[in-house]
Amino acid sequence: MSDAFIYDAIRTPRGRGRPDGALHEATALHVSAGVLDALAARNGIEGPVLEDVIWGTVTQIGEQGGCIARTAVLASSLDETIPGLSINRFCGSGLEAVGLAAAQVRGSGGAYIAGGVEMMGRVAMSSDGAAIAVDPTVAMETHFVPQGIAADLIATEYGFTRQDVDALAVESQHRAARAWAEGRFARSVVPVRDVNGLVLLDHDEHIRAGTDMAALARLEPSFKAMGEVMPGFDRVALLRYPQHERIEHVHHAGNSSGIVDGASGVLVADREWGQARGLRPRARIRASAKIGTEPTIMLTGPVAVTEKVLAQAGMTIADIDLFEVNEAFAAVVLRFMQAFGVSADKVNVNGGAIAMGHPLGATGAMLIGTVLDELERTGQGTGLVTLCVASGMGVAMIVERV
Amino acid sequence: MADFTMKTGADGVAVITWDVADRSMNVMSMAGFAELDALVAQALADDGVKGVVITSGKDTFAGGMDLNVLAAMRDEAGDDPARGLFDGIMGMHAVLRRIERAGMDPKTLKGGKPVAAALPGTALGIGLELPLACHRIFAADNPRAKIGFPEINVGIFPGGGGTTRVSRKLGLMASAPFLLEGKLRSPVDAQRAGLIDEVVAPDALLDAARAWVLAAGGDDIVKPWDRKGFRFPGGAPYHPAGYMTFVGASAMVAGQTWNAYPAPRALLSAIYEGAQVDFDTALRIEARWFTHILLNPSSSAMIRTLFLDKEALEKGANRPDQPSQKVARLGVIGAGMMGAGIANVAAQAGIDVVLLDATDEQAARGRAHAQSDMEKAVKRGRMTADARNAALARITATTDFAALAGVDLVVEAVFEDPQVKAEVTRKAMAHVGPDCVFASNTSTLPIGELAQASDRPEDFIGIHFFSPVERMALVEIIRGAQTGPRAVARALDFARQIRKTPIVVNDARFFYANRCIIPYLNEGMRMLGEGVAPALIENAARMLGFPLGPLQLIDETSLELGLRIAAATKAALGDAYADAPVDAVLQAMAAGGRLGRKAGAGFYAYSDRGDRQGLWPGLAQMFPQADTQPDLVTVQHRLMFAQVLEAVRALESGVLGDIREGDVGAILGWGFAPWSGGPFSWLDMLGAPYAEARADELAESCGPRFAPPALLREMAASGQSFHARFAARAAA
């Protein structure tokens, strides 16, 4: 059995997911093909040399539907013999794509591009529908609540105050701004260009560098109305967590992940494939795992899946040098650090989705590049990437430099 | 005699009249369906018939389905009840669908005959589902008529096409009050809501329907859902607008019902799944979910308790064989909240009332309470100004006991003190006639002891009202050892006059209701004292369907009452008293002046205006929470078993003579988990062997108060169910 290696990992800059965002005019297909072209150009990929392109996209409807993975291959410079696979594990899709590629490399070798795209300003989140939210047989049985309520439930259950979540958000902004100022993302960020080669976006435009506690304190909680008034999701959450009298609504636009447009891609292959092309692997994929967790609180998967992936790799939490825990909501990251007693100095050291945004299906693969860049910059060896996933799931991957 | 008859007029309109013999209101049976189907087929085949009007021979249209029909369908299907129910329900759909299609070609939608429904009055359940299958619904402008679907209140949902038709007619949001909440509307309001089409003067009802039938064109008789391009109003589940509505619906239903009932969930599934397919498929889906809910033990138990048994008790199932004891003139002593409420409901039921208190001011205040309640009813259109004036004129407020001369019944509602009660009893007895029955509205004092103040103990009885009198449906009638059958009959006839559901129990400490409620409250306080999170205690109760958690209920009734009851119980039981942990909680709260809602402070915090703010944060210091919390089911079982074991003891000791009264009384009296059908229905659902084992476990872990009574052990050993064993006795 061959090991699975990462040869390259790139991402687009993240555009604000609104009509005034710089990527709003770009199609999901164009952005996806751009990532494939960039990976091909950077690594000399020509001809029928990839087994598959695995693309994570959450909202697979409209331009992101119809197996955009295959369409993106056709729209790119890649050979038409390379197929495409669109997958959806919600926010874990991008990382799952890399995990699937790695598992197949381990099983039968070859090379894959794995990543994802999500143009949230163009294809609205949830517009593809979801039985878990509307079908009473599951919505009522599993106590479905939207993610914001779930995040507030985490804060309620584990005792995080508004102060706690806001402080994490301020730190995320600060770290992301510093990382950009010092060029720490230079290796992985590939600008998005128009059909004529003009740059549409070359930096993350969601960051608010000057954010401070006072500014965040002015924001109203985002999920209070839907929780307490219409339609009253708090009661649904309390039916599952009856030890609480109420849900503390602490999350708002400033301490939740930003809605953005973006895409990412990772080149995963076995050692022979790289050697034949004179490519040096950047890291080995040590282990990857996914898990299902209690769906109402929904977003506590990173804890359970990290325990699982560590056990699988025969490692302990102390063996990990750097963590990327997707900042879907501040409480998710706080819960991760609380559960493992991990220092904030090792977690999301260059900021996260609260500052830079979370293009759902693309984020997982983006974080692979982020952690690799930082491991290389600081000369450390092992990184763990994990994301919380809707409907009560978690995904994680451990990578180590070679 | 046939339920349905048909007569075709010279104008070519066939009028089908529904008139079930020996019933005050029409109810639908399987035979009725077959008759209706045959008559409709005959009218459609007859070239001389231009169209059909379906109406009623009574002043109401129909009260609904004969619920025994559903039970029969299930039972007759033997070992495949799902098949029996599903096929039977599909048979009903087929009849209604033939009316709706009315002979038209399903492809071209041409060739059908118009069918109108003409409702002279109340139309409930299938009595509305049948009109909904017609092409136009006319209703007489009869403000007393009620139109809607009460099904959800007895644990089922409209399963004769009502769910599918109303949701397609009004959309999910607008149909929710009718389908999910069981709201009944007057014809005018039903028309405004889009449920029916026209409201006409009562004497013009048939003419209006006939005229419409004669004028109706081919387009008028095609339902929107039978046309190409039908769109679900407000959007189907995966339409952008509909999606948000459906997401919200599950949450709202879960929240409002605390997810305690199976029927709203099944109903919502029928709508959700039905909205995604064509109409006939949707009916099939509705039938599957309706079958599913009929097979759920909760629906059988709710139908039995809240419909069949409740009605039986209201009709005097346990009334002694006595001539009519209707009350024409009532005396109420004590014009406080209870007395004023009793006077109010009696006056509104057409009874003359002498409302007596110690001072003119107090008596007048009691009458003013009735007046303000009636004003509210007038304002909301539930009472006419004339009716208000008449009812108010029936109440005489006085301080003079001599005014009690000529009353048929006295209800005493003075302070809960034997001395005070004895004194008013003596004073009243001095003025009333030899035929008068004297009742005490005590909630805790033994009737036998109170009766000693009367020289006619056979005419002394307890009538325990619940607060607020106007809203609470139950009265608990307490028969003292010497109470005679005439007094019982009079109390029952009075209950019927004021439209309350009565139970009759024998005289013992706390009678039946309070006997069971007190352990519920105490168990809540015990858990709090043990360090169980107060929110868990309260939520666990709400999730069982109790309207109030135990701590909130104590706040409402006041901790002083709790302390008084504790003191009295301790005095009565001596060394056997086992509620010291409860007293400790009560005393700690009382020491801090937290005596409940009236004191503005209790287990909950209250604003200056008296609004409940949430659990008092200080509880965390007073009763520190344990690190390990019990699971939800354990908390719920403690709350449930504390009550149901007491109900079994009440049955065992003869306080309860009829388990129907135990079940009905528990739900109507203190809101006992309505989905369960009551304490005995719940025990039957669990099965006596499990209930016994669980009670033993609880006795082991929580204390001997959970030890199974001998009756429960006996039933566990013999594998009997309460309803199987005691129903026979009640009927005998």
Image: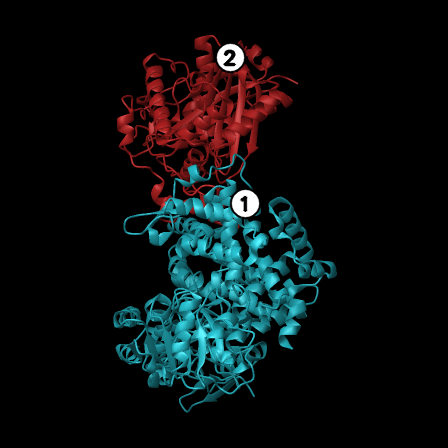
Chain colours: A red, B cyan
Say which quadrant the N terminus of chain B sits in: bottom right
- Residue at the spot 71% in from the left edge and 60% down from the top edge: B714
Amino acid tagged 2: Arg
Q: Numbered disc 2: what chain?
A: A
Q: Secondary structure at mark 1?
A: helix
Left or right, B694 with reference to A208? right
Place of residue A401 in the rendered image (x, y in percent of width and height, measured from the top left): 53, 12
Q: Secondary structure at mark 2?
A: loop
Residue receiving disc 2: A282
Place of residue B27 in the rendered image (x, y in percent of width and height, measured from the top left): 51, 78
Foreground residue, A124 or B505?
B505
Say which quadrant the C terminus of chain B sits in: bottom right
Above or below, B536 against B332 in this view is above
Residue A115 at least partly seen: no
Foreground residue, A298 or B285?
A298
Amino acid tagged 1: Leu
Mark sitting on residue B632: 1
Q: Nearer the viewer, mark 2 or mark 1?
A: 1
Foreground residue, A383 or A97?
A383
Place of residue B84 in the rendered image (x, y in percent of width and height, measured from the top left): 64, 67
Q: CA distance from mark 2 to mark 1?
A: 51 Å
Left or right, B726 with reference to B559? right
Indicate the quadrant where residue A197 lies: top left
Residue B391 at least partly seen: yes
